[in-house]
């Protein structure tokens, strides 16, 4: 019964995005990330034909048309989205109309955008190259004179971000504390506080702020990413796994987090599910050295050494510039007592990353196992030099 439940869970978790109509949508997003906009359009067409109400797909197809300078087709998609989700595409409509020289329409759509919940920061509007085409117009000036488009809170939040960017952390934190007390958008306020704490080497305070940020808004992708990174560093793999699931559920285009989730699952000994996520990522990016590396790590942790070697051999056929590929294949060789091969791979990794203490340490272990104490001694000394303190025990034992 337990096995059946596990299989069902795996199918539900990975096929939530990978199968059915959503498969075309995810593959389309992957094509977009590679700059293959025409291929993405064809996949979005497939999804929209299947489900005409998928406004996310229509919006992304509009982005692809925009990227290809097909502004009339982009506008058609964006107008359709706006009919279903008011103002969702108004900024893109303003950009397209500005590119076409339709100045009044561009201002009209920009006004819609400024009045909506999708409004971006003022500086991003002012620096947008498409909108810069109409910034000289009297209509533009009138628009900004109509009303104060940004609230006092929004301006204070931007001021806090500016203070942070200039390194004025005390004033930034004071302002953020006041905003936090007012209880408006506490998720973003606490996320920025966490950034400041991390930049000042205070991970405990950063974690506290991130926890509050996520509690206030579980859909704050930036906060989730920061907490995932912090939890991964601290070894809190269970919560990192949970946050990765949430992140890719709400933002399936965050492709690197499929690999992060696979890595977290492997840390949590959920090897079958970890493998499925890594393989799904590789179905989107077949030549990804990072994807192959994670898949190899999963096999290694699951003690499937032959599978791991096959993966790393495949990766190294096309990618010789990543030290972790040589290092991880070396670990597989060492796990199978093939220390000569392991030492060679560690040497290749060190050519690419000569100050990595862990590689020097593992090479020392392999050289020691194959009976070369002199070389092993040298490697352990280099490992200690670059920060691996437990190398000192081996230095005392074998170095003469």
Image: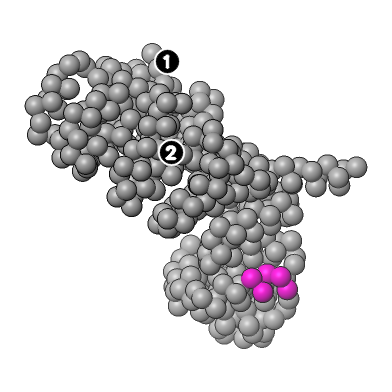
Question: Is residue 86 or residue 373 the one in the foreground?
Answer: 86
Q: Is residue 295 magenta?
A: no
Q: Which residue is mark 2?
A: 59
Instruction: Locate residue 161: give its quadrant.
Output: top left
The answer to whether 177 is drawn above or below residue 93 in the figure is: above
| Residue picked out by circle 1 | 183
Residue 277, percent across and down?
A: 64, 53
Q: Main secondary structure of the magenta part?
A: helix
Residue 254 drawn at (x, y percent)? 50, 46
Residue reaching furthest top? 182
Position of the C terminus, as image quadrant, is bottom right
Q: Describe residue 316's horizontal placement relative to residue 333 as left or right.
A: left
Tell me where the magenta segment starts and ends, as one range. 306-311
Residue 329 in view here: yes
- Callout 1 crowding tier (Cα within 10 Å): few <14, some 14–19, many ≥20: few
Q: CA distance from mark 2 to mark 1?
A: 32 Å
Vertically, is 227 above or below 14? Answer: above
For the residues carrying marks 2 and 1, which lies nearer the camera in this image? 2
């Amino acid at each position: 019964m337990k096995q059946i439940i596990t299989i069902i869970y795996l199918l539900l978790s990975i096929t939530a995005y990978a199968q059915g109509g959503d498969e075309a949508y995810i593959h389309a997003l992957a094509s977009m990330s590679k700059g293959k906009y025409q291929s993405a359009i064809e996949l979005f067409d497939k999804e929209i034909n299947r489900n005409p109400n998928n406004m996310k797909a229509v919006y992304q197809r509009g982005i692809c048309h925009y990227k290809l300078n097909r502004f009339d087709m982009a506008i058609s998609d964006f107008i359709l989205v706006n009919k279903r989700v008011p103002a969702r595409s108004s900024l893109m409509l303003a950009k397209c109309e500005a590119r076409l020289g339709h100045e009044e329409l561009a201002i009209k759509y920009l006004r819609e955008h400024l009045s909506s919940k999708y409004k971006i920061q003022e500086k991003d509007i002012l620096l947008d190259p498409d909108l810069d085409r109409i910034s000289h117009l009297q209509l533009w000036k009138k628009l900004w004179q109509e009303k104060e488009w940004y609230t006092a809170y929004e301006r204070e939040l931007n001021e806090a971000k500016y203070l942070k960017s200039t390194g004025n952390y005390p004033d930034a934190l004071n302002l953020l504390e006041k905003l936090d007390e007012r209880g408006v958008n506490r998720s973003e306020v606490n996320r920025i506080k966490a950034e400041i704490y991390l930049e000042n080497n205070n991970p405990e305070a950063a974690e506290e702020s991130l926890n509050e940020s996520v509690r206030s808004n579980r859909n704050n992708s930036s906060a989730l990413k920061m907490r995932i990174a912090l939890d991964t560093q601290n070894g809190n793999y269970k919560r990192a796994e949970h946050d990765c699931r949430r992140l890719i559920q709400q933002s399936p285009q965050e492709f690197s987090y499929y690999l992060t989730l696979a890595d977290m699952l492997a840390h949590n000994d959920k090897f079958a599910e970890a493998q499925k996520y890594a393989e799904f990522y590789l179905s989107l990016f077949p030549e990804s050295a990072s994807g192959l590396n994670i898949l190899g790590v999963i096999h290694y942790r699951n003690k499937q050494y032959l599978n791991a070697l096959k993966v790393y051999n495949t990766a190294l056929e096309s990618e010789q510039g990543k030290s972790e590929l040589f290092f991880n294949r070396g670990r597989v060789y060492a796990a199978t007592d093939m220390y000569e091969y392991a030492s060679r791979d560690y040497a290749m990794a060190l050519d690419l990353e000569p100050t990595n203490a862990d590689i020097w340490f593992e090479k020392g272990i392999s050289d020691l196992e194959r009976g070369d104490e002199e070389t092993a001694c040298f490697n352990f000394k280099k490992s200690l030099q670059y920060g691996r303190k437990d190398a000192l025990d081996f230095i005392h034992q074998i170095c003469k």
